[in-house]
Amino acid sequence: MIAKDKFLRAQVGVVVVLTVLGSWYFGSKYGFINPQLFPTPEQFIAAARQLTLGEGYAGGLLLQHILQSVKLILLGFLAATAVGVPLGLWIGWSRKAEALVGPVFLLIRPIPALAWIPLAIVWLGLGDAAKIMILWLAAFVPSVINSFTGVRNIPLTIIEASQMLGIRGWPLVKEVIVPGALPSIFTGVRLSLQVCLTALVAAELLGAPLGLGKILYQASLDIYPAMILVGMVTVAIVGFVLTAAFDYVEHLSMPWRTNN
């Protein structure tokens, strides 16, 4: 049944994509779409060919831009989850830790990651470190909140029963707390990955020599709608691939959980 539902969703997705592409093609062909505001398929293909096989754009070829952006996403994402998940587990488990760290976290939490851009430039300049800082700040909050929630949602009876059986300290964390919070942790990590993708374009406005954000920014300055669309589609594809890889890791980590 699950396989059948997934196949049906895939079929619907293919139909929707083909419908959108067909509408775009015929709308452009018969003049329903203004090519100065939205590119025709021919303009899109020409811009994609320039970026991939031609002289490139915004300082490099498409593969160079993708590799730079993926590097920033992964570094920001991994750094945020490496700090955020343990911190969320800690303050979720320890009331003292929550009292100590919670007020500071509550002060930082409402500040949008993009609001840190001026300080990131002052502290770290225009290199990769400033961009990673912005992505780290964007991804940090979801990983903390969901890890905290995962611990707090574990039934107290399970923890008490484990302690009665002599499971305490690190074994309790490893065998009870982390497995019990794992679904919520993965939800937070997934959100962290998504916000990294969302913040990428803004982060790469900080004087980036390469990157998908650089393509979009330069194309907007050049009033080049076809290249803007190429950049947007590339961001979507990169996001899809990274999300699929994350889904695979999640399935390996929690094979008992059914993905509907």
Image (cartoon, rainbow, N blue to C red):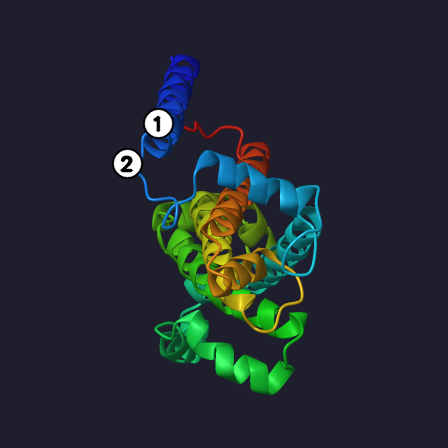
- Amino acid carrying label 1: it is Phe
Location of residue 26 (image quadrant): top left
Q: Disc 2 marks which residue?
A: 32
- Of residues 245 and 230, the one nearer the viewer is 230
Local crowd at mark 1 within 10 Å, few (<14), some, or many (≥20)?
Answer: some
Q: Does residue 36 appear anywhere in the picture?
A: yes
Q: Position of residue 175 (x, y in %)?
A: 56, 45
- Of residues 132 and 253, the one nearer the viewer is 132
- Give the residue displayed 35% in from the left and 20% down from the top: 12
Upstream in the sequence, badge 2 or badge 1?
1
Q: Does residue 162 appear anywhere in the picture?
A: no
- Give the residue displayed 43% in from the left and 29% down from the top: 259
- Amino acid carrying label 2: it is Phe
Q: Is residue 179 left or right of residue 108?
A: right
Q: How many numbered marks appear? A: 2
User: Which element is circle 1 on?
Assistant: helix
Q: Disc 1 marks which residue?
A: 26
User: Which element is circle 2 on?
Assistant: loop
Q: Could you tell me if the residues under marks 2 and 1 are in contact, i.e. CB atoms within 8 Å? A: yes
- Placement of 135 over or under 120, stated as above or below: above
